[in-house]
Image (tube, rainbow, N blue to C red):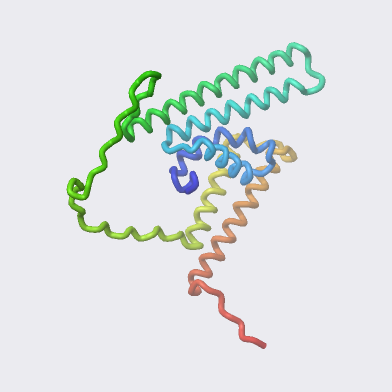
Amino acid sequence: MTLIDTFPRAALDLVLVALLPIIVPTVGNAAAAEALALRMLDEYHPTTIRELHMAGEAIGFRLDALRAKAEAHEPGITAEQRDNARKWACCLTRSEHQVLRALAELKRTSLAGAGEATPPVRAGDPAPAPRPVPTADQSPAAGPPAAPVPPASEPDDVTKAERALASAEKLLGLMRAHHKGGPPPHSQAAQQIQAQERVVGAARLKLAQARRQQSSGGAAPEQSAA
C-alpha cells in the first residue's frame, strides 16, 4: 500500500509543498520530483500523519544540508563564505539527527502502547518462565467462523484518471503558488511550470478517453477481419 493510499492527499501536500521546491530544480520534472519525494518519505515507514510530517522535516534538513555542502565547494567564493556554508551544513545535519531521534522515540512509544512492553534483561537475572500454552480443555470455546471479508475492488479507469488529473492539477497549483507573480519567461522555473501544464493537459485527455470508453460499454468495438 502506497502513501497515497494510506494518508489523505491534504496531509501529503503539506509535506510536498516544502520538499518539491528543493527537489524540482535538480530533477527538472515536477512529476518525477513528486515521485522521488514520496519514495523518500516511504523509506521512513510513517504510520501516522505526525510521523509523516516528521519524516518530511528530516528529509528537508538533509537536502538543505547537502545543498549547503555543495555551495561550500563552488568556485569563486571567499573563504568566509565557504566556512559559513560548512557551518550551516553542520547545523542542518544536527537538526536532521534530532528529528530522526524524536521520530524513532515516537515509533517506540507507539509500539509500546500497542502491545505489552517487554522489560529489559540484565546480566544475572533469571530466565523468564515460559508462558503456559492453553490445552484443549482450557482454550475458550470457538465462536462462529468470521464472515469472509470481500477483497477491495480496484478503482476503474475513470477513477484512476480522475485521481491522476487531480494530483497533476494540485502539483501545478503548488508550483505556481511558490513562484508568485510568475517566474521569468525563459527561466528554469518557467519551463518546469510549462512541463507540468503539459502533464495536466495529458491527464485531462486521458480522463476524457476513459469516460468515452466507459460510456461506450468499457471496450472498443472489434473490427471484422478483412
Residue extending farthest to the right is 76
- Percent across and percent down for residue 143 are 20, 54
At horizontal 43% and vertical 25% (from top left) the residue drawn is: 105
Image location of residue 69, percent across then percent down: 70, 23
Q: Position of residue 43 (x, y in %)?
A: 54, 38
Pick whichever, 168 or 102, lies toward us: 102
Q: In terms of depth relative to the viewer, which is nearer, 17 or 150?
A: 150
Q: Nearer the viewer, residue 194 or 28?
A: 28
Query: Compared to 117, does 170 lie above or below?
Result: below
Q: How many marks?
A: 0
The answer to which of 93 and 184 lies nearer the viewer is: 93
- Reply above or below: 120 against 12: above
Q: Is residue 156 above or below residue 174?
A: below
Query: 82 left or right of 223?
Result: right
- Residue 58 position by quadrant: top right
Counting from the top left corner in percent of width and height, residue 198 is at 65, 52
Query: Which residue appears farthest toward the top when viewing the image?
Result: 80
Say which quarter of the image contains residue 204.
bottom right
**Residue name at image x 74 percent, y 16 percent:** 82
Q: Residue furthest bottom?
A: 226
Residue pictured at 50% horizontal, 39% vertical = 13
State the residue at coordinates (51%, 32%): 55
Relative to residue 181, is residue 71 drawn left or right?
Answer: right
**Quadrant holding the C terminus:** bottom right
In the rendered structure, the answer to whether residue 199 lies left or right of residue 7 reads: right
